[in-house]
Amino acid sequence: MPLRQILTAAGTCLVVTGFFYLFGLGPTTYERTFDQNLAHFPLAASRAQRDPGLRDIFLRKTEAAFDRGGWRAANGALMMSMVTDVETFADDEHINAISRSTMAVLLKLRDNPAACKQFLLVGAETDELPDAKAEIEQSWHADLAAAEDGFSRRMSGVKWATPSDSQILNVERYLRRAPVATLTQAEIEAEAKYPDGDAELICSARIKKAALSPRDAAYPQRVMMSNTGNIDIAAALRKLCRENKDATACS
């Protein structure tokens, strides 16, 4: 090919590439550095390397959160995606272990409603919520074990479809009549205002809903885990910061 044609072709390629970047059709800075940043979360990174579809889910969810709430929101979105897109595939034993460890955290934080609400809405990163440090660490271990099992089952072909709104509603109705105590009207209304509901009422309602026997817990817990993906973590973080100015969620 003559040199002029080569240069013309190269120039056309650069123009097209520039057009895509100019109009936002090329990869964003976030996307170009995604794998480098994901490496700080080895478990998620290793899963993303083995499952390109899961990597795309992580990228889409964390970039959306980052655009609205920065790195704290992006990190939270990644953890939520690990729950909704990996851990929900785990077997009943691992799901029940999550239920028990979550209950231990909630009981520890019951006397600190603001911290309890934060844990329920956006989770906890390392060294956040020191009042329940040991319990949160145990909860992390349960989550990691479920993630290992859930990923293996997902890769082996086990299916778990995101529950429909009607399925979520049915589980919510069932959990509101949990064995320990039925939710009060005030607790139901507080939950309906999520994330604007009263922290103490939200925490007490969640403790009641978590009080199921292991035999009964796996399916409703799995549905509740799936439903966490509907939380707008950036909006939740902003709300928590307005309610509690020195909250770790504000950092």
Image (spheres, rainbow, N blue to C red):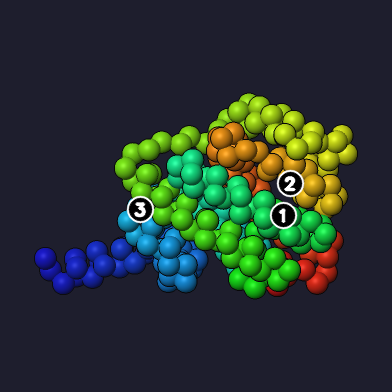
- Packing grade of label 2 (10 A; few <14, some 14-19, many >=20) is many
Q: Residue at x 38, y 44 (%)?
A: 154
| Label 1, label 2: how far apart the Cα atoms are | 7 Å
Closer-to-camera residue (234/24) = 234
Identify the residue position indicated by label 3 in the image.
Answer: 52
> Measured from the top left, where is residue 167 in percent x and y?
60, 28
* Residue 4: numbered disc: none
Q: Is residue 161 left or right of residue 194?
A: left
Residue 116 figure quarter: bottom right
Residue 146 to residue 8: above or below: above
* Residue closest to the far right: 186
Residue 63 figure quarter: bottom right
Identify the residue position indicated by label 2 in the image.
Answer: 207
Amino acid bearing label 1: Leu
| Label 2, label 3: how far apart the Cα atoms are | 37 Å
Point out the frontmost of discs 1 and 3. Answer: 1
Choose the circle earlier in sequence order: 1 or 3.
3
- Packing grade of label 3 (10 A; few <14, some 14-19, many >=20) is few
Q: Residues at badges 1 and 2 in contact (C-beta under 8 Å)?
A: yes
Q: Is residue 195 left or right of residue 234?
A: right
* Residue 106: numbered disc: 1
Choose the circle earlier in sequence order: 1 or 2.
1
Residue 215 figure quarter: top right
Choose the circle earlier in sequence order: 2 or 3.
3
| Label 1, label 3: how far apart the Cα atoms are | 35 Å
